[in-house]
Image (cartoon, grey):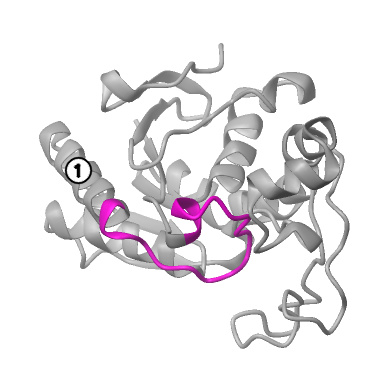
């Protein structure tokens, strides 16, 4: 049967600084590297043998994948880097300190921007520092200036349907190293989580989520490999 592992990247420098990161390419901290190494140790203890991996095009997800796969001595597997697995774009909130932003706009407003399913933060400026349309990683893509979780799901789904699902249908074991919101989008799709419920789903950093799938790619079993840091899982 096919198996899927979802791995949220380890702590980044802007995670440490409590800043909205989104599409900005911020590297892991030493703690983030340690989280990725621990994820690899958990994968090794499980005896998982991966056939293929996927990451976003952001360094914190790529390096988390590399570190974890290095621990299990499987760096050789094919890896597809796809921008559609990027973190949600936080628009004009990008680079701002989360606590200071809540003090300025009010906690309720910031909670709406961060946690609602279909409400986006104010957009970044077209042509400004957080407009990534001219970045070489996004050829021919008019990059978004802000995104809700719904928008993130809408761009993740085509990657799932055309790239990831066919590998799983071929009974492969697949690793996806990505971000809190792009992984939540996959969880929402895979487990048919409702719009109101998905906003409460949290995926811990550096804790592999192992999902065993049926031939039809329906979840059959799901668990975090580090039970001590597990978050509540959706019902299926």
Q: Residue at x 49, y 18 (%)?
A: 233
Q: Residues within 10 Å of mark 1 (few under 14, many from 20)?
A: many
Question: Does residue 230 lie above or below 163 as drawn?
Answer: above
The C terminus: image quadrant: top right
Where residue 136 sits, quadrant-wise, is bottom right
Q: Position of residue 158 (x, y in %)?
A: 69, 54
The N terminus: image quadrant: top left
Front residue of 202 and 193: 202
Q: Position of residue 54 (x, y in %)?
A: 44, 58
SS label for mark 1: helix
* Residue at the top extreme of this rendering: 235
Q: Residue at x 37, y 22 (%)?
A: 230
Residue 155 lies in the magenta-colored region:
no
Q: Main secondary structure of the magenta part?
A: loop
Residue 44 left/right relative to 27: left
Front residue of 198 and 3: 198
Residue 28 lies in the magenta-colored region:
yes
Q: Position of residue 83 (x, y in %)?
A: 60, 67
Magenta region, residue range = 14-31
Residue 94 left/right relative to 137: right
Q: Is residue 221 visible?
A: yes
Q: Residue at x 81, y 47 (%)?
A: 104
Question: Does residue 57 lie above or below 3 as drawn?
Answer: below
Q: Residue at x 75, y 57 (%)?
A: 93
Q: Is residue 236 visible?
A: no
The residue that disc 1 covers is 38
Where residue 205 sits, quadrant-wise, is top left
Question: Does residue 128 lie above or below 51 as drawn?
Answer: below
């Amino acid at each position: 049967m096919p198996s899927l592992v979802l791995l949220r990247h380890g702590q980044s420098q802007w995670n440490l600084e409590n800043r909205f990161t989104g599409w900005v390419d911020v590297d892991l901290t030493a703690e983030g590297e340690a989280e990725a190494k621990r994820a690899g140790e958990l994968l090794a203890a499980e005896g998982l043998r991966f056939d293929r991996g996927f990451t976003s095009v952001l360094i914190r997800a790529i390096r988390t994948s590399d570190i974890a796969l290095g621990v299990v001595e499987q760096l050789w597997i094919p890896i597809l880097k796809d921008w559609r697995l990027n973190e949600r774009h936080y628009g004009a909130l990008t680079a701002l300190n989360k606590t200071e932003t809540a003090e300025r706009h009010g906690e309720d407003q910031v909670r709406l921007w961060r946690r609602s399913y279909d409400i986006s933060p104010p957009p970044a400026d077209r042509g400004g520092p957080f407009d990534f349309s001219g970045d070489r990683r996004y050829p021919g893509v008019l990059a978004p200036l802000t995104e809700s979780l719904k928008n993130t799901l809408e761009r993740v789904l085509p990657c799932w349907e055309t790239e990831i699902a066919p590998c799983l249908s071929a009974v492969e074991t697949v690793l996806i190293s990505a971000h809190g919101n792009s992984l939540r989008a996959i969880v929402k799709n895979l487990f048919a989580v409702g719009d109101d419920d998905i906003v409460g789903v949290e995926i811990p950093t550096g804790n592999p989520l192992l999902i065993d799938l049926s031939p039809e790619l329906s979840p059959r079993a799901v668990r975090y490999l580090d039970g001590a840091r597990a978050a509540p899982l959706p019902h299926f």
